[in-house]
Image (spheres, rainbow, N blue to C red):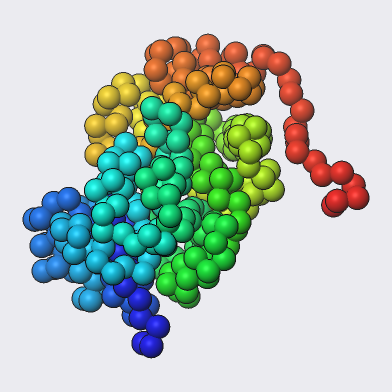
Amino acid sequence: MSNRLKIAVLGGGSFGTVLANIAAENGHQVKLWLRDDARAAEINAKHENSRYLPGYELAPVLEASAVLSDVLQAADLVFVSIPSASFRSVVKLAAPYLKADQMIVSTTKGIESQNFSLMSEILRDELPDARIGVLSGPNLAKEIACRQLTATVIASDDNALRIRVQQVLHRDYFRVYASSDSYGVELGGTLKNIYAIAAGLSAALGMGENTKSMLMTRSLAEMSRFAVCMGANPMTFIGLAGVGDLIVTCMSPLSRNYRVGYALGQGKSLDEAVSALGQVAEGVNTIKQVKEKAAEMDVYMPLVTALYAVVFQQAPIADVVKMLMTNEQSTDVEFVLPRQQQ
């Protein structure tokens, strides 16, 4: 193809692998970075990431490598799909091999624990001259691997970056929408992880459809209330990166955070739940970080407070539910535009 680009994807987990493969199927030269030489060699030999996506056939032209400089050399576009705990350290390692005006997109839905930094803020810290975007949406990697229809959002104040990501990733089963509200899109993808844990927990307890509906709608109100206090646009939360991502993570057993919540609802300890998962569930740490930030900003977040009590203080679930149902009654819809703006 005449507009063939060099694409680098940092992170060989399920979502990083899926993105790399989509770009490769679209005819681009794609390199996937993993820390493990043996896993990279296996991907190149078998065209499969057997650890995270067994049975998902990868494009023969997709190349995996554990050599960061090789993966990043002359890259036109870089996706970073690294868990939040390691995100900054990997970006620091990558920095010497990136161009001054590098297009770089975070796909990580998490918060850095030390200073409540979102991943885009880490990119700005470490790569002040880079052109930055975030990718988020209702994107369960295993469903994308099965080519089930879905969509995502690329958010950036750089229009050329948004267009490039749309061109690189668009498939007949994977549509890429654009947004200029990077902060809202990123917060939506991060905050919903908390409520997916609550949804999994409630499912394990056998709660009904009415309960699920109440939980998701109150979760949406709570996360948008917090995000607006952080400077996001509340309208972002009625889109794919807000309510769309919230629905899929609160309803699907494929969601890592849902599975952690389900295990907790079965009576397992937090360590047992996380260990059984075998992958990072960003929502566990996000609960603690958001609770502290909400207290600092005086934002009312009863679901976060309740989850914190259950997950980190081993509070009896029945007592926490009773507290939720008897505490202060707030309004239903809290962000209503004036009539002349509707």
How far from the left and from the top, in percent, is residue 268? 31, 23
Left/right placement of residue 142 relative to residue 224 reads left
Q: Quadrant of the N terminus?
A: bottom left
Q: Residue furthest right?
A: 340
Residue 11 position, x and y percent, is 27, 53
Q: Which of 318 and 282 is in front in this view?
A: 282
User: Residue at image x 41%, y 13%?
Assistant: 313
Residue 303, position as x, y percentages in the image? 56, 25
Quadrant housing residue 110: top left
Classify 57 as above or below 106: below
Q: Is residue 143 left or right of residue 302?
A: left
When the figure is inspected, residue 185 is found, relative to residue 258, above or below; the finding is below
76 and 79: which is toward the camera? 76
Q: Does the rendering let one see residue 81?
A: yes
Task: Tell me the residue at 53%/69% (across/down).
Answer: 160
Question: Residue 323 or 290: which is nearer the viewer?
Answer: 290
> In this view of the protein, which residue sits in the foreground, 158 or 174?
158
Residue under the image location 24 percent in, 39 percent down: 278
Q: Relative to residue 177, is residue 43 drawn left or right?
A: left
Up-down relation of residue 22 to residue 113 (above or below):
below
